[in-house]
Protein backbone atom coordinates (compact mmCIF):
# COMPACT_ATOMS: atom_id res chain seq x y z
CA UNK A 1 0.00 0.00 0.00
CA UNK A 2 2.86 2.37 0.81
CA UNK A 3 4.48 1.67 -2.51
CA UNK A 4 1.23 2.23 -4.43
CA UNK A 5 0.46 5.47 -2.60
CA UNK A 6 3.91 6.90 -3.28
CA UNK A 7 3.58 6.12 -6.97
CA UNK A 8 0.13 7.74 -6.96
CA UNK A 9 1.77 10.95 -5.81
CA UNK A 10 4.32 10.67 -8.62
CA UNK A 11 1.64 10.05 -11.24
CA UNK A 12 -0.38 13.00 -9.97
CA UNK A 13 2.66 15.28 -10.31
CA UNK A 14 3.38 14.01 -13.81
CA UNK A 15 -0.25 14.60 -14.78
CA UNK A 16 -0.03 18.19 -13.57
CA UNK A 17 3.23 18.87 -15.43
CA UNK A 18 1.95 17.14 -18.56
CA UNK A 19 -1.21 19.25 -18.58
CA UNK A 20 0.76 22.44 -18.04
CA UNK A 21 3.48 21.80 -20.61
CA UNK A 22 1.22 20.27 -23.26
CA UNK A 23 -1.01 23.34 -23.11
CA UNK A 24 1.54 26.15 -23.18
CA UNK A 25 4.60 24.63 -24.90
CA UNK A 26 5.42 26.29 -28.23
CA UNK A 27 8.54 26.36 -30.44
CA UNK A 28 8.14 29.33 -32.84
CA UNK A 29 11.87 29.98 -33.16
CA UNK A 30 12.76 26.33 -33.61
CA UNK A 31 10.28 24.51 -35.88
CA UNK A 32 8.08 25.11 -38.91
CA UNK A 33 5.08 23.90 -36.91
CA UNK A 34 5.41 25.89 -33.67
CA UNK A 35 2.31 24.52 -31.95
CA UNK A 36 1.39 20.87 -32.37
CA UNK A 37 4.63 18.92 -32.61
CA UNK A 38 6.04 20.06 -29.28
CA UNK A 39 2.67 19.38 -27.64
CA UNK A 40 2.73 15.85 -29.03
CA UNK A 41 6.22 15.41 -27.58
CA UNK A 42 5.35 16.66 -24.10
CA UNK A 43 2.13 14.64 -24.07
CA UNK A 44 3.86 11.44 -25.16
CA UNK A 45 6.73 11.80 -22.70
CA UNK A 46 4.37 12.39 -19.78
CA UNK A 47 1.95 9.67 -20.88
CA UNK A 48 4.60 6.98 -21.25
CA UNK A 49 6.11 8.03 -17.92
CA UNK A 50 2.69 7.51 -16.34
CA UNK A 51 2.26 4.21 -18.18
CA UNK A 52 5.58 2.90 -16.89
CA UNK A 53 4.59 3.64 -13.28
CA UNK A 54 1.19 2.05 -13.78
CA UNK A 55 2.90 -1.17 -14.83
CA UNK A 56 4.44 -1.57 -11.39
CA UNK A 57 1.74 0.07 -9.25
CA UNK A 58 -1.65 -0.88 -10.72
CA UNK A 59 -2.62 -4.24 -9.23
CA UNK A 60 -5.16 -6.74 -10.49
CA UNK A 61 -7.76 -5.30 -8.11
CA UNK A 62 -7.52 -1.91 -9.82
CA UNK A 63 -8.24 -3.34 -13.27
CA UNK A 64 -11.06 -5.50 -11.91
CA UNK A 65 -12.65 -2.54 -10.14
CA UNK A 66 -12.44 -0.52 -13.33
CA UNK A 67 -13.01 -3.45 -15.64
CA UNK A 68 -15.10 -1.50 -18.14
CA UNK A 69 -12.55 1.30 -18.43
CA UNK A 70 -9.77 -1.28 -18.74
CA UNK A 71 -11.66 -3.16 -21.46
CA UNK A 72 -12.39 0.06 -23.36
CA UNK A 73 -8.73 1.05 -23.17
CA UNK A 74 -7.70 -2.26 -24.73
CA UNK A 75 -10.40 -1.96 -27.38
CA UNK A 76 -9.27 1.59 -28.17
CA UNK A 77 -5.68 0.54 -28.77
CA UNK A 78 -6.80 -2.51 -30.73
CA UNK A 79 -9.05 -0.44 -33.00
CA UNK A 80 -6.33 2.17 -33.52
CA UNK A 81 -3.92 -0.51 -34.75
CA UNK A 82 -6.60 -2.05 -36.96
CA UNK A 83 -7.18 1.34 -38.57
CA UNK A 84 -3.44 1.83 -38.96
CA UNK A 85 -3.08 -1.51 -40.75
CA UNK A 86 -6.26 -1.75 -42.80
CA UNK A 87 -7.01 1.79 -43.93
CA UNK A 88 -5.30 2.95 -47.10
CA UNK A 89 -3.58 6.03 -45.66
CA UNK A 90 0.16 6.34 -45.09
CA UNK A 91 1.43 4.51 -41.99
CA UNK A 92 3.70 7.34 -40.87
CA UNK A 93 0.97 9.97 -41.32
CA UNK A 94 -1.44 7.84 -39.30
CA UNK A 95 1.09 7.15 -36.58
CA UNK A 96 2.30 10.72 -36.01
CA UNK A 97 -0.70 12.52 -37.51
CA UNK A 98 -0.74 15.11 -40.26
CA UNK A 99 1.03 18.44 -40.05
CA UNK A 100 -1.02 21.00 -38.16
CA UNK A 101 -3.00 18.37 -36.23
CA UNK A 102 -0.78 15.44 -35.17
CA UNK A 103 -3.68 13.50 -33.69
CA UNK A 104 -2.58 10.10 -34.93
CA UNK A 105 -2.11 6.77 -33.17
CA UNK A 106 0.69 8.04 -30.93
CA UNK A 107 -1.47 10.92 -29.70
CA UNK A 108 -4.46 8.73 -28.87
CA UNK A 109 -2.42 6.03 -27.16
CA UNK A 110 -0.87 8.80 -25.06
CA UNK A 111 -4.29 10.24 -24.22
CA UNK A 112 -5.46 6.77 -23.22
CA UNK A 113 -2.49 6.45 -20.85
CA UNK A 114 -3.15 9.81 -19.17
CA UNK A 115 -6.83 8.83 -18.81
CA UNK A 116 -5.84 5.56 -17.10
CA UNK A 117 -3.39 7.42 -14.86
CA UNK A 118 -6.16 9.86 -13.94
CA UNK A 119 -8.44 6.99 -12.92
CA UNK A 120 -5.64 5.60 -10.75
CA UNK A 121 -5.06 8.84 -8.81
CA UNK A 122 -8.69 9.98 -8.62
CA UNK A 123 -9.26 11.59 -5.22
CA UNK A 124 -9.96 15.04 -3.80
CA UNK A 125 -6.30 16.08 -3.73
CA UNK A 126 -5.98 15.23 -7.41
CA UNK A 127 -9.13 17.20 -8.25
CA UNK A 128 -7.78 20.19 -6.38
CA UNK A 129 -4.40 19.95 -8.13
CA UNK A 130 -6.02 19.81 -11.58
CA UNK A 131 -8.28 22.78 -10.79
CA UNK A 132 -5.26 24.79 -9.68
CA UNK A 133 -3.21 24.01 -12.79
CA UNK A 134 -6.24 24.96 -14.90
CA UNK A 135 -6.26 28.35 -13.17
CA UNK A 136 -2.52 28.80 -13.72
CA UNK A 137 -2.74 27.85 -17.38
CA UNK A 138 -5.80 30.03 -17.87
CA UNK A 139 -4.11 32.97 -16.18
CA UNK A 140 -0.91 32.69 -18.21
CA UNK A 141 -2.89 32.22 -21.43
CA UNK A 142 -5.08 35.21 -20.55
CA UNK A 143 -2.10 37.48 -19.93
CA UNK A 144 -0.39 36.36 -23.13
CA UNK A 145 -3.64 36.77 -25.07
CA UNK A 146 -3.96 40.27 -23.67
CA UNK A 147 -0.47 41.11 -24.92
CA UNK A 148 -1.42 39.77 -28.34
CA UNK A 149 -4.56 41.92 -28.42
CA UNK A 150 -2.51 45.00 -27.50
CA UNK A 151 0.01 44.28 -30.26
CA UNK A 152 2.81 43.52 -27.81
CA UNK A 153 3.35 39.90 -28.79
CA UNK A 154 7.12 39.17 -29.00
CA UNK A 155 6.39 36.43 -31.56
CA UNK A 156 5.61 37.32 -35.16
CA UNK A 157 2.97 34.68 -35.85
CA UNK A 158 1.93 33.87 -39.42
CA UNK A 159 -1.72 34.12 -38.45
CA UNK A 160 -4.78 34.93 -40.57
CA UNK A 161 -7.17 34.91 -37.62
CA UNK A 162 -7.63 37.18 -34.63
CA UNK A 163 -4.26 38.04 -33.03
CA UNK A 164 -5.51 36.44 -29.80
CA UNK A 165 -4.38 32.85 -30.43
CA UNK A 166 -2.53 32.20 -27.16
CA UNK A 167 -0.42 29.06 -27.03
CA UNK A 168 -2.85 27.03 -29.16
CA UNK A 169 -2.57 28.80 -32.51
CA UNK A 170 -6.25 29.60 -33.03
CA UNK A 171 -8.68 32.08 -31.39
CA UNK A 172 -11.37 29.40 -30.94
CA UNK A 173 -8.99 27.12 -29.04
CA UNK A 174 -7.67 30.03 -27.02
CA UNK A 175 -11.16 31.23 -26.15
CA UNK A 176 -12.29 27.75 -25.06
CA UNK A 177 -9.20 27.31 -22.88
CA UNK A 178 -9.84 30.66 -21.20
CA UNK A 179 -13.42 29.62 -20.52
CA UNK A 180 -12.25 26.40 -18.88
CA UNK A 181 -9.71 28.28 -16.78
CA UNK A 182 -12.36 30.77 -15.68
CA UNK A 183 -14.61 27.93 -14.50
CA UNK A 184 -11.73 26.52 -12.45
CA UNK A 185 -11.09 29.98 -10.96
CA UNK A 186 -14.70 30.20 -9.81
CA UNK A 187 -14.40 26.75 -8.21
CA UNK A 188 -11.39 27.82 -6.15
CA UNK A 189 -13.01 31.14 -5.27
CA UNK A 190 -16.10 29.42 -3.87
CA UNK A 191 -14.10 26.97 -1.75
CA UNK A 192 -14.44 28.13 1.91
CA UNK A 193 -10.91 26.92 2.67
CA UNK A 194 -9.31 29.17 0.03
CA UNK A 195 -7.12 31.88 1.52
CA UNK A 196 -8.15 35.47 0.89
CA UNK A 197 -5.13 36.42 -1.22
CA UNK A 198 -5.63 33.34 -3.41
CA UNK A 199 -9.32 34.17 -3.77
CA UNK A 200 -8.40 37.65 -5.03
CA UNK A 201 -6.05 36.15 -7.61
CA UNK A 202 -8.74 33.70 -8.72
CA UNK A 203 -11.31 36.45 -9.19
CA UNK A 204 -8.79 38.53 -11.15
CA UNK A 205 -8.08 35.49 -13.36
CA UNK A 206 -11.78 35.16 -14.13
CA UNK A 207 -12.02 38.77 -15.30
CA UNK A 208 -8.82 38.58 -17.35
CA UNK A 209 -9.83 35.30 -18.98
CA UNK A 210 -13.33 36.44 -19.89
CA UNK A 211 -12.15 39.84 -21.13
CA UNK A 212 -9.54 38.29 -23.43
CA UNK A 213 -12.03 35.64 -24.60
CA UNK A 214 -14.47 38.44 -25.45
CA UNK A 215 -11.94 40.24 -27.69
CA UNK A 216 -10.68 37.06 -29.36
CA UNK A 217 -13.48 37.14 -31.99
CA UNK A 218 -14.63 33.75 -30.70
CA UNK A 219 -17.74 33.14 -28.59
CA UNK A 220 -16.67 29.69 -27.46
CA UNK A 221 -14.96 30.76 -24.25
CA UNK A 222 -17.91 32.76 -22.92
CA UNK A 223 -20.32 29.93 -23.73
CA UNK A 224 -18.04 27.33 -22.15
CA UNK A 225 -17.86 29.47 -19.01
CA UNK A 226 -21.64 29.88 -18.90
CA UNK A 227 -22.13 26.13 -19.22
CA UNK A 228 -19.64 25.42 -16.44
CA UNK A 229 -21.31 27.92 -14.12
CA UNK A 230 -24.68 26.32 -14.88
CA UNK A 231 -23.28 22.93 -13.82
CA UNK A 232 -21.90 24.37 -10.57
CA UNK A 233 -25.29 25.97 -9.99
CA UNK A 234 -26.98 22.61 -10.48
CA UNK A 235 -24.87 21.02 -7.75
CA UNK A 236 -25.60 23.92 -5.39
CA UNK A 237 -29.34 23.60 -5.98
CA UNK A 238 -29.21 19.79 -5.81
CA UNK A 239 -27.61 19.86 -2.38
CA UNK A 240 -30.41 22.05 -1.03
CA UNK A 241 -32.49 18.87 -1.04
CA UNK A 242 -35.56 20.54 -2.52
CA UNK A 243 -36.73 18.57 -5.53
CA UNK A 244 -39.09 21.29 -6.75
CA UNK A 245 -36.31 23.87 -6.89
CA UNK A 246 -34.02 21.38 -8.62
CA UNK A 247 -36.72 20.59 -11.18
CA UNK A 248 -37.31 24.26 -11.93
CA UNK A 249 -33.58 24.86 -12.30
CA UNK A 250 -33.13 21.92 -14.70
CA UNK A 251 -36.16 23.02 -16.73
CA UNK A 252 -34.70 26.49 -16.99
CA UNK A 253 -31.39 25.06 -18.17
CA UNK A 254 -33.08 22.99 -20.88
CA UNK A 255 -35.11 25.97 -22.06
CA UNK A 256 -32.05 28.22 -22.15
CA UNK A 257 -30.05 25.58 -24.01
CA UNK A 258 -32.83 25.12 -26.56
CA UNK A 259 -33.11 28.85 -27.26
CA UNK A 260 -29.31 29.16 -27.48
CA UNK A 261 -29.01 26.31 -29.97
CA UNK A 262 -31.75 27.91 -32.09
CA UNK A 263 -29.79 31.16 -32.01
CA UNK A 264 -26.67 29.44 -33.30
CA UNK A 265 -28.77 27.97 -36.11
CA UNK A 266 -29.94 31.49 -37.07
CA UNK A 267 -33.39 31.01 -35.57
CA UNK A 268 -35.16 32.75 -32.71
CA UNK A 269 -34.57 36.08 -30.98
CA UNK A 270 -30.93 35.27 -30.12
CA UNK A 271 -29.91 34.64 -33.72
CA UNK A 272 -28.64 38.20 -34.27
CA UNK A 273 -26.28 37.76 -31.31
CA UNK A 274 -25.18 34.13 -31.71
CA UNK A 275 -25.32 33.19 -35.38
CA UNK A 276 -22.07 33.35 -37.35
CA UNK A 277 -21.37 32.19 -40.93
CA UNK A 278 -18.83 29.75 -39.49
CA UNK A 279 -21.78 27.69 -38.20
CA UNK A 280 -22.79 27.00 -41.80
CA UNK A 281 -19.21 26.10 -42.70
CA UNK A 282 -19.06 23.67 -39.78
CA UNK A 283 -22.16 22.00 -41.19
CA UNK A 284 -20.23 21.42 -44.43
CA UNK A 285 -17.37 19.85 -42.48
CA UNK A 286 -19.74 17.67 -40.45
CA UNK A 287 -21.51 16.34 -43.53
CA UNK A 288 -18.21 15.51 -45.23
CA UNK A 289 -16.95 13.70 -42.13
CA UNK A 290 -20.16 11.74 -41.74
CA UNK A 291 -20.00 10.71 -45.41
CA UNK A 292 -16.49 9.40 -44.78
CA UNK A 293 -17.76 7.34 -41.86
CA UNK A 294 -20.73 5.96 -43.80
CA UNK A 295 -18.56 4.91 -46.73
CA UNK A 296 -15.82 3.50 -44.47
CA UNK A 297 -17.71 2.26 -41.37
CA UNK A 298 -15.14 -0.19 -39.97
CA UNK A 299 -11.84 1.66 -40.20
CA UNK A 300 -12.68 5.14 -41.43
CA UNK A 301 -10.41 6.88 -43.93
CA UNK A 302 -7.34 6.53 -41.69
CA UNK A 303 -6.13 8.23 -38.54
CA UNK A 304 -5.83 11.99 -39.01
CA UNK A 305 -6.66 11.56 -42.72
CA UNK A 306 -9.78 13.73 -42.87
CA UNK A 307 -7.88 16.42 -44.80
CA UNK A 308 -6.84 14.09 -47.62
CA UNK A 309 -10.44 12.95 -48.05
CA UNK A 310 -12.42 16.14 -47.50
CA UNK A 311 -12.56 17.10 -51.18
CA UNK A 312 -13.80 13.66 -52.16
CA UNK A 313 -16.65 13.54 -49.64
CA UNK A 314 -17.86 17.15 -49.45
CA UNK A 315 -21.14 18.15 -51.05
CA UNK A 316 -21.54 20.36 -54.11
CA UNK A 317 -22.92 23.13 -51.88
CA UNK A 318 -19.80 22.98 -49.71
CA UNK A 319 -17.59 23.06 -52.83
CA UNK A 320 -19.27 26.17 -54.22
CA UNK A 321 -20.08 28.04 -51.00
CA UNK A 322 -16.62 29.56 -50.52
CA UNK A 323 -14.88 28.15 -53.55
CA UNK A 324 -13.34 24.73 -54.25
CA UNK A 325 -9.93 25.69 -52.81
CA UNK A 326 -11.30 26.31 -49.31
CA UNK A 327 -10.84 23.01 -47.49
CA UNK A 328 -10.49 21.61 -43.97
CA UNK A 329 -8.37 18.93 -42.33
CA UNK A 330 -10.80 18.29 -39.46
CA UNK A 331 -14.58 17.90 -39.08
CA UNK A 332 -14.77 20.55 -36.32
CA UNK A 333 -16.63 18.00 -34.22
CA UNK A 334 -14.65 15.53 -32.14
CA UNK A 335 -17.29 12.79 -32.42
CA UNK A 336 -17.49 13.00 -36.21
CA UNK A 337 -13.70 13.14 -36.40
CA UNK A 338 -13.49 9.81 -34.57
CA UNK A 339 -16.05 8.24 -36.91
CA UNK A 340 -14.45 9.65 -40.07
CA UNK A 341 -10.84 8.88 -39.20
CA UNK A 342 -11.23 5.63 -37.24
CA UNK A 343 -14.61 4.20 -38.16
CA UNK A 344 -17.78 3.63 -36.15
CA UNK A 345 -16.04 1.30 -33.64
CA UNK A 346 -13.66 4.10 -32.59
CA UNK A 347 -16.58 6.50 -32.18
CA UNK A 348 -18.50 3.98 -30.06
CA UNK A 349 -15.49 3.33 -27.83
CA UNK A 350 -15.08 7.06 -27.22
CA UNK A 351 -18.79 7.45 -26.45
CA UNK A 352 -18.56 4.49 -24.06
CA UNK A 353 -15.78 6.25 -22.12
CA UNK A 354 -18.00 9.30 -21.83
CA UNK A 355 -20.88 7.07 -20.78
CA UNK A 356 -18.81 5.75 -17.87
CA UNK A 357 -18.08 9.32 -16.80
CA UNK A 358 -21.76 10.30 -17.02
CA UNK A 359 -22.69 7.24 -14.97
CA UNK A 360 -20.28 8.29 -12.21
CA UNK A 361 -21.62 11.85 -12.23
CA UNK A 362 -25.15 10.47 -11.87
CA UNK A 363 -24.07 8.27 -8.94
CA UNK A 364 -22.37 11.23 -7.30
CA UNK A 365 -25.48 13.38 -7.67
CA UNK A 366 -27.58 10.65 -6.03
CA UNK A 367 -24.96 9.83 -3.39
CA UNK A 368 -25.70 12.85 -1.23
CA UNK A 369 -22.03 13.49 -0.36
CA UNK A 370 -20.28 16.77 -1.14
CA UNK A 371 -16.91 17.14 -2.82
CA UNK A 372 -16.52 20.73 -3.98
CA UNK A 373 -13.51 20.05 -6.18
CA UNK A 374 -15.06 16.99 -7.81
CA UNK A 375 -18.00 19.19 -8.75
CA UNK A 376 -15.47 21.63 -10.18
CA UNK A 377 -13.90 18.87 -12.26
CA UNK A 378 -17.35 17.93 -13.57
CA UNK A 379 -18.12 21.56 -14.45
CA UNK A 380 -14.88 21.99 -16.39
CA UNK A 381 -15.44 18.60 -18.08
CA UNK A 382 -18.93 19.53 -19.22
CA UNK A 383 -17.55 22.80 -20.59
CA UNK A 384 -14.89 20.89 -22.49
CA UNK A 385 -17.41 18.43 -23.90
CA UNK A 386 -19.64 21.29 -25.06
CA UNK A 387 -16.84 22.92 -27.05
CA UNK A 388 -15.78 19.55 -28.49
CA UNK A 389 -19.10 19.38 -30.37
CA UNK A 390 -18.10 22.40 -32.47
CA UNK A 391 -14.31 22.23 -32.31
CA UNK A 392 -11.24 20.17 -33.11
CA UNK A 393 -9.34 17.65 -30.99
CA UNK A 394 -6.42 20.04 -30.62
CA UNK A 395 -3.76 18.36 -28.47
CA UNK A 396 -3.43 21.24 -25.99
CA UNK A 397 -7.17 21.08 -25.31
CA UNK A 398 -7.77 17.35 -25.80
CA UNK A 399 -5.41 16.41 -22.97
CA UNK A 400 -7.71 18.25 -20.54
CA UNK A 401 -10.75 16.33 -21.71
CA UNK A 402 -9.10 12.94 -21.31
CA UNK A 403 -7.60 13.71 -17.88
CA UNK A 404 -10.91 15.05 -16.59
CA UNK A 405 -12.75 12.02 -17.98
CA UNK A 406 -10.35 9.72 -16.14
CA UNK A 407 -10.74 11.61 -12.84
CA UNK A 408 -14.52 11.33 -13.10
CA UNK A 409 -14.48 7.62 -14.00
CA UNK A 410 -12.22 6.98 -11.01
CA UNK A 411 -14.41 8.86 -8.54
CA UNK A 412 -16.07 5.85 -6.92
CA UNK A 413 -12.73 4.25 -5.99
CA UNK A 414 -12.04 7.32 -3.86
CA UNK A 415 -15.29 6.84 -1.97
CA UNK A 416 -14.99 3.09 -1.42
CA UNK A 417 -11.35 3.25 -0.37
CA UNK A 418 -11.42 6.47 1.67
CA UNK A 419 -10.35 4.75 4.90
CA UNK A 420 -7.46 2.99 3.21
CA UNK A 421 -6.36 6.25 1.59
CA UNK A 422 -6.26 8.05 4.94
CA UNK A 423 -4.08 5.31 6.40
CA UNK A 424 -1.85 5.40 3.34
CA UNK A 425 -1.40 9.18 3.61
CA UNK A 426 -0.30 8.91 7.25
CA UNK A 427 2.23 6.21 6.42
CA UNK A 428 3.34 8.19 3.35
CA UNK A 429 4.16 11.24 5.47
CA UNK A 430 6.29 9.22 7.88
CA UNK A 431 8.15 7.45 5.09
CA UNK A 432 8.34 10.29 2.62
CA UNK A 433 12.12 10.52 2.28
CA UNK A 434 12.55 6.78 2.03
CA UNK A 435 9.94 6.48 -0.73
CA UNK A 436 11.08 9.52 -2.68
CA UNK A 437 14.54 8.05 -2.96
CA UNK A 438 13.31 4.68 -4.26
CA UNK A 439 15.69 4.06 -7.17
CA UNK A 440 13.46 1.43 -8.77
CA UNK A 441 10.54 3.84 -9.16
CA UNK A 442 12.80 6.56 -10.53
CA UNK A 443 14.41 4.19 -13.03
CA UNK A 444 11.04 2.91 -14.26
CA UNK A 445 9.78 6.47 -14.65
CA UNK A 446 12.93 7.50 -16.50
CA UNK A 447 12.58 4.59 -18.93
CA UNK A 448 8.97 5.57 -19.66
CA UNK A 449 9.89 9.22 -20.24
CA UNK A 450 12.74 8.27 -22.56
CA UNK A 451 10.51 5.92 -24.57
CA UNK A 452 7.85 8.60 -24.93
CA UNK A 453 10.42 11.18 -26.01
CA UNK A 454 12.18 8.82 -28.41
CA UNK A 455 8.96 7.87 -30.18
CA UNK A 456 7.59 11.40 -30.49
CA UNK A 457 10.75 13.39 -31.31
CA UNK A 458 11.34 12.45 -35.01
CA UNK A 459 8.67 14.78 -36.50
CA UNK A 460 9.77 17.60 -34.19
CA UNK A 461 13.39 17.13 -35.24
CA UNK A 462 12.38 16.99 -38.91
CA UNK A 463 10.46 20.24 -38.57
CA UNK A 464 13.43 21.89 -36.87
CA UNK A 465 15.73 20.70 -39.67
CA UNK A 466 13.39 22.17 -42.25
CA UNK A 467 13.33 25.56 -40.53
CA UNK A 468 17.13 25.61 -40.26
CA UNK A 469 17.51 24.55 -43.89
CA UNK A 470 15.12 27.23 -45.11
CA UNK A 471 17.00 29.89 -43.19
CA UNK A 472 20.30 28.74 -44.71
CA UNK A 473 18.94 28.90 -48.32
CA UNK A 474 21.38 26.10 -49.17
CA UNK A 475 19.90 23.69 -51.70
CA UNK A 476 21.54 20.55 -50.32
CA UNK A 477 20.34 21.25 -46.77
CA UNK A 478 16.83 21.91 -48.05
CA UNK A 479 16.80 18.64 -49.98
CA UNK A 480 18.08 16.76 -46.93
CA UNK A 481 15.38 18.34 -44.80
CA UNK A 482 12.73 17.25 -47.29
CA UNK A 483 13.94 13.64 -47.10
CA UNK A 484 13.98 13.59 -43.28
CA UNK A 485 11.93 10.86 -41.61
CA UNK A 486 9.03 10.77 -41.06
CA UNK A 487 8.06 11.91 -44.53
CA UNK A 488 5.43 14.61 -44.53
CA UNK A 489 3.50 15.53 -47.70
CA UNK A 490 2.93 19.10 -46.54
CA UNK A 491 6.66 19.63 -46.06
CA UNK A 492 7.47 18.03 -49.42
CA UNK A 493 4.83 20.09 -51.23
CA UNK A 494 6.06 23.32 -49.67
CA UNK A 495 9.68 22.63 -50.59
CA UNK A 496 8.78 21.55 -54.13
CA UNK A 497 6.81 24.79 -54.64
CA UNK A 498 9.72 26.87 -53.35
CA UNK A 499 12.10 25.09 -55.72
CA UNK A 500 9.79 25.79 -58.66
CA UNK A 501 9.66 29.48 -57.76
CA UNK A 502 13.47 29.47 -57.90
CA UNK A 503 13.53 27.71 -61.30
CA UNK A 504 14.86 24.47 -59.80
CA UNK A 505 12.36 22.40 -61.74
CA UNK A 506 14.39 19.20 -61.94
CA UNK A 507 14.73 18.92 -58.16
CA UNK A 508 11.09 19.92 -57.67
CA UNK A 509 9.91 17.30 -60.14
CA UNK A 510 11.83 14.57 -58.36
CA UNK A 511 10.25 15.53 -55.02
CA UNK A 512 6.76 15.78 -56.49
CA UNK A 513 6.97 12.36 -58.12
CA UNK A 514 8.14 10.77 -54.89
CA UNK A 515 5.44 12.53 -52.88
CA UNK A 516 2.60 11.43 -55.16
CA UNK A 517 3.89 7.87 -55.00
CA UNK A 518 4.08 7.83 -51.21
CA UNK A 519 0.90 9.84 -50.63
CA UNK A 520 -1.41 9.15 -53.59
CA UNK A 521 -4.45 10.58 -51.78
CA UNK A 522 -2.84 13.96 -51.21
CA UNK A 523 -4.49 16.43 -53.58
CA UNK A 524 -1.85 19.13 -53.13
CA UNK A 525 0.93 16.71 -54.16
CA UNK A 526 -0.75 16.09 -57.52
CA UNK A 527 -1.44 19.80 -57.89
CA UNK A 528 2.21 20.69 -57.33
CA UNK A 529 3.26 18.04 -59.84
CA UNK A 530 0.84 19.35 -62.47
CA UNK A 531 2.16 22.91 -62.12
CA UNK A 532 5.88 22.17 -62.59
CA UNK A 533 6.83 23.68 -65.98
CA UNK A 534 9.07 20.80 -66.99
CA UNK A 535 6.58 18.02 -66.29
CA UNK A 536 5.76 15.95 -69.44
CA UNK A 537 2.24 16.43 -70.84
CA UNK A 538 1.33 12.80 -70.25
CA UNK A 539 2.34 13.05 -66.61
CA UNK A 540 0.48 16.34 -66.23
CA UNK A 541 -2.65 14.73 -67.67
CA UNK A 542 -2.34 11.89 -65.17
CA UNK A 543 -1.95 14.37 -62.32
CA UNK A 544 -5.08 16.27 -63.43
CA UNK A 545 -7.01 13.01 -63.63
CA UNK A 546 -5.96 12.08 -60.09
CA UNK A 547 -7.04 15.53 -58.91
CA UNK A 548 -10.48 14.97 -60.45
CA UNK A 549 -10.79 11.65 -58.64
CA UNK A 550 -9.82 13.25 -55.32
CA UNK A 551 -12.04 16.32 -55.90
CA UNK A 552 -14.90 15.09 -58.11
CA UNK A 553 -17.22 18.11 -57.62
CA UNK A 554 -14.60 20.79 -58.32
CA UNK A 555 -15.91 22.74 -61.37
CA UNK A 556 -12.45 24.11 -62.19
CA UNK A 557 -11.22 20.57 -62.92
CA UNK A 558 -13.92 19.66 -65.45
Image (cartoon, rainbow, N blue to C red):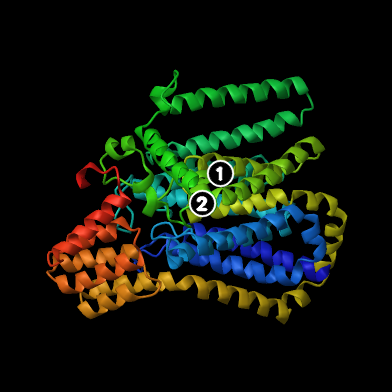
Q: Above or below — where is 423 with respect to 361?
A: below
Which quadrant of the rendered structure holds the C terminus? top left
The residue positioned 78% from the left and 67% from the top of the image is 4
Which residue does the numbered mark 2 point to in the structure image?
Answer: 397
Q: Above or below — where is 473 with respect to 100?
A: below
For the residues labelled 1 and 2, say whether their Cβ atoms are less than 8 Å apart. yes
Residue placed most toward the observer, 421 or 307: 307
As helix, strand or loop, the secondary structure at mark 1 comes to helix
Mark 1–mark 2 Cα distance, whole angstroms, equals 8 Å
Which residue does the numbered mark 1 point to in the structure image?
Answer: 384
Which comes before the other along the chain, label 1 or label 2?
Answer: 1
Which quadrant of the rendered structure holds the N terminus? bottom right
Disc 1 packing (10 Å; few <14; some 14–19; many ≥20): many
Residue 255 coordinates in the image, percent (x, y): 58, 21
Q: Above or below — where is 198 with respect to 479?
A: above
Q: Please state if 335 lies on the left or on the right of 169 as rendered.
A: right
Q: Please state if 171 lies on the left or on the right of 56 as rendered.
A: left
The residue positioned 43% from the left and 39% from the top of the image is 287
Amino acid sequence: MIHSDEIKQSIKKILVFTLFLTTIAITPWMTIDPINLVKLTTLSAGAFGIGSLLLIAAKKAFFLKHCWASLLSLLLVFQLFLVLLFSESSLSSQFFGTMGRNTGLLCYVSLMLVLTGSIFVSETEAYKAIIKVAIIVGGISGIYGGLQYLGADPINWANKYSPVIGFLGNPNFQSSLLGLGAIASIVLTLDPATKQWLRVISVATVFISLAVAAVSHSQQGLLVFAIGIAVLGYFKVKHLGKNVVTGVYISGLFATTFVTVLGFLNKGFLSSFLYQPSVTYRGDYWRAGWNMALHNPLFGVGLDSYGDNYRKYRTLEATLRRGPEVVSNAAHNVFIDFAANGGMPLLLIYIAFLGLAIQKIHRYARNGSRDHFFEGVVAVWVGFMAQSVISINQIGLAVWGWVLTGLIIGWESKVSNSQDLQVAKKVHKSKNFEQASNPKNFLVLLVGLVIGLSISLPPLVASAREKTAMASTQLEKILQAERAWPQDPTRSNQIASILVSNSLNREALKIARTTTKRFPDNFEAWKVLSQIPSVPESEKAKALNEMKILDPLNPSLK
